[in-house]
Amino acid sequence: MARLLRQSAVVTLCAAVALACVFVVTAAAPVRLTNGPVPTSTATPTEVVAQPVDPIRAWSELRLAEMTPDEKVRSLLVIHVPGINPDGMRVAVDSVASGGAGVGGLILMRDNIPGTPEELASLTAYAEADPALPPIVAIDEEGGDVVRLPYDEFAGADSLRAADATQTATAFAGRAALLSSVGVNLNFGLVADVTSDPGSFIYWRTFGDDPAAAAQRVAAGVSAETPVVASTLKHFPGHGRTGADSHHGIPTTDVSFDEWMSTDALPFVAGITAGAPAVMFGHLVFSSVDSAPATLSGRWHDVLRTDLGFDGLAITDDMLMLQSSGIADLSDPYANAVSALSAGNDLLLYVLPADMTTVGIDLTTLSATLVANVSAERIDESALRVLMFRRALAPDALTWRPPCDVLCTAQQVGGFVSTRPVMLVRQDASSLS
């Protein structure tokens, strides 16, 4: 019995840390675990192969099962709450049941940044309404031309694009430590776009004229940043093909898919290989692939997932940019949201003004529209992915144990019935009496 208990403890420990362990339990002697007559036959010992349970996924699946459709779609929103407003930020991420908006996360813009890192750390800490499921706290902190933190003194792409890749790693390691210290957990900071045109608005935000050289720097940045703060690659599938600015229109290129794969795709591939957990889609049209902006394109999401093998978070650029494009078909924010979520995005980003009515958005209407027009399967897929990302931020994420009523099952060992916890048990039926 002691041997069986020790083995069970090992299985539980393996599950807690999600190790790829396989354990074989052999009943050396019958053990009386339940009432009833003692079997007279002698059974061949049962082989029980226990696979580990990922505690982050198991917790997230349980949480997902408890969520309403409205709660699920709200969890897929990352929004801007204007100003230094701790109560507003906390209400935004608090659960709907507690009177909050229940959104999945916040993006910090320059108007959210107080004078010192300590003040910002207090602000983001107060916004954590549920320690078991911390909100996403995102920021555009590239360095160089795009910074939100006045106390970020680390190099950006404007200087790194001509430097050795190790300098990119040094800069983003330092930036990650700073971001983590102020409560940021997701940085929209690595531009994987490529252009050799100094006249392009994005030129000084890219890591090189040459795709291969830019890819090395992007990979170095991801490798240095992601162990501390989650990196985001942007703006997929690549903003460098045109000098147009997607804040004021929908840049369009007719470059072929094959040419894209051998050029613009390289920094994204390198960043994904280096472990980037997030990719931001740009409001860009590659007409030879899809006439829709990549943000709203199921084809481009399939390229990211299937061709490039990415399994992390897919995030839109600011959804309000679509409305600002001047294109009539993109003027409805609710239709845009349905298209973006249906295409495969996991998170919809909204840099909202203080008065949301000025951009025609109401969160209640937005949620109801998404629930009514996007399949439950599509919503669940993204909701689980977002839950797992957020749950991994919790301090007890790896030590949490699933409740017994989820994992305990009746199991026959050597002719006897055990109700000890088992994990994804597979039994050899031929060995049972």
Image (cartoon, rainbow, N blue to C red):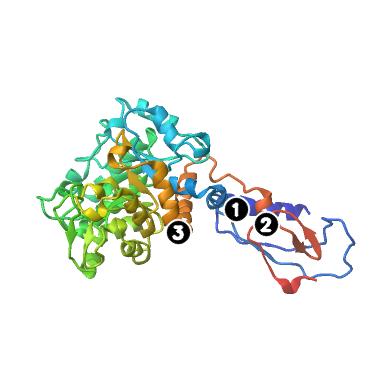
323 vs 252: above or below: above
Q: Residues within 10 Å of mark 3 (few under 14, many from 20)?
A: few
Q: Can you say which quadrant of the picture contains the C terminus?
A: bottom right
Q: Residues within 10 Å of mark 1 (few under 14, many from 20)?
A: many
Residue at 84% in and 70% down: 42
Q: Residue furthest left?
A: 199
Residue at 35% in and 37% down: 179
Q: Secondary structure at mark 2?
A: loop
Q: Can you say which quadrant of the picture contains the N terminus?
A: bottom right
Amino acid residing under circle 2: Val
Amino acid residing under circle 3: Ser
Is 143 displayed left or right of 222 in the figure?
left
Mark 2 and mark 1: Cα distance apart in space: 12 Å
The image shows residue 6 at horizontal and vertical percentages of: 71, 52
Mark 1 and mark 3: Cα distance apart in space: 36 Å
* First in residue order: circle 2 vs circle 3: 3
* First in residue order: circle 2 vs circle 1: 1
Q: Secondary structure at mark 1?
A: helix
Is 178 displayed left or right of 157 in the figure?
right
Asked if the residue at tag 3 contacts the one at tag 1, i.e. Cβ–Cβ closer than 8 Å, the answer is no
Asked if the residue at tag 3 contacts the one at tag 2, i.e. Cβ–Cβ closer than 8 Å, the answer is no
Which residue is under mark 2? 422
* First in residue order: circle 1 vs circle 3: 1
* Front position in the image: 121 or 405: 405
Is 21 displayed left or right of 274 in the figure?
right
301 vs 278: above or below: below
Q: Which mark is residue 14?
A: 1
Q: Residues within 10 Å of mark 2 (few under 14, many from 20)?
A: many
Which callout, 1 or 3, points to the residue nearer the camera? Answer: 3
Which residue is under mark 3? 375
The image shows residue 374 at horizontal and vertical percentages of: 42, 57
